């Protein structure tokens, strides 16, 4: 089983990667980490500081229906539905749409 790296170890790994003079594969081999794990660390670091929640504005439409809702995402996409979502299902739907 792989050992869990500390935040400091991951930071040193990423700093070393950015200063490398060898290929990515050679660097990973020398550090004992897979390229996919390095990619995961880089991706996770690039997402730091990005907002996890988006500010929304509620607007009343011409159609009055308590069973319908519209979510306008920060990238301009809209989700309109009449479904009754659990909170976790709605959060998952938003994560999927925002990831595309």
Image (cartoon, rainbow, N blue to C red):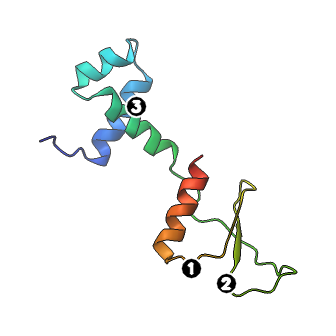
Judged from this view, the residue extending furthest toward the left is 1
Q: Quadrant of residue 81?
A: bottom right
Judged from this view, the residue extending furthest toward the top is 22
Query: Mark 2–mark 3 contact, CB under 8 Å?
Result: no
In this rendering, is residue 47 above or below 18?
A: below
Measured as percent of width and height from the top left, residue 72 is found at 73, 65
Out of 33 and 75, give the one closest to the viewer: 75
- Given this view, does label 2 or label 3 mark the residue nearer the observer? 2
User: Could you tell which of marks 1 and 3 lies nearer the N-terminus?
Assistant: 3
Q: Quadrant of residue 12?
A: top left
Q: Quadrant of the N terminus?
A: top left
Is disc 3 placed on a helix, strand or loop?
helix
Whether residue 100 sits left or right of residue 31 in the image: it is right
Q: Which residue is mark 3?
A: 15
Measured as percent of width and height from the top left, residue 65 is found at 75, 86
Judged from this view, the residue extending furthest toward the right is 62
Whether residue 22 sits left or right of residue 88 in the image: it is left
Is disc 1 placed on a helix, strand or loop?
loop
How far is the residue under mark 1 from the one under mark 3? 46 Å
Measured as percent of width and height from the top left, residue 59 is found at 81, 78
Whether residue 38 sits left or right of residue 89 in the image: it is left
Q: Which residue is mark 2?
A: 67
Query: Mark 1–mark 2 contact, CB under 8 Å?
Result: yes
At 39% across and 25% down in the image, what residue appears? 17
Q: How many marks?
A: 3
At 72% across and 53% down in the image, what residue appears? 75
How far is the residue under mark 1 from the one under mark 2? 7 Å
At 43% across and 21% down in the image, what residue appears? 19
Q: Which residue is mark 1?
A: 84
């Amino acid at each position: 089983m792989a050992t869990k790296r500390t935040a400091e170890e991951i930071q040193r790994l990423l700093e070393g990667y950015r200063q490398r003079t060898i290929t990515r594969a050679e660097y990973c081999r020398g550090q004992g980490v897979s390229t996919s794990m390095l990619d995961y660390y880089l991706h996770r670091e690039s997402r730091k500081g990005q907002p996890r929640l988006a500010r929304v504005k509620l607007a009343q439409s011409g159609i009055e229906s308590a069973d319908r809702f519209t979510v306008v995402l920060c990238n301009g996409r809209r989700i309109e539905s009449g479904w009754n979502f659990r909170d976790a299902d709605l959060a998952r739907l938003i994560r999927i749409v925002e990831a595309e």
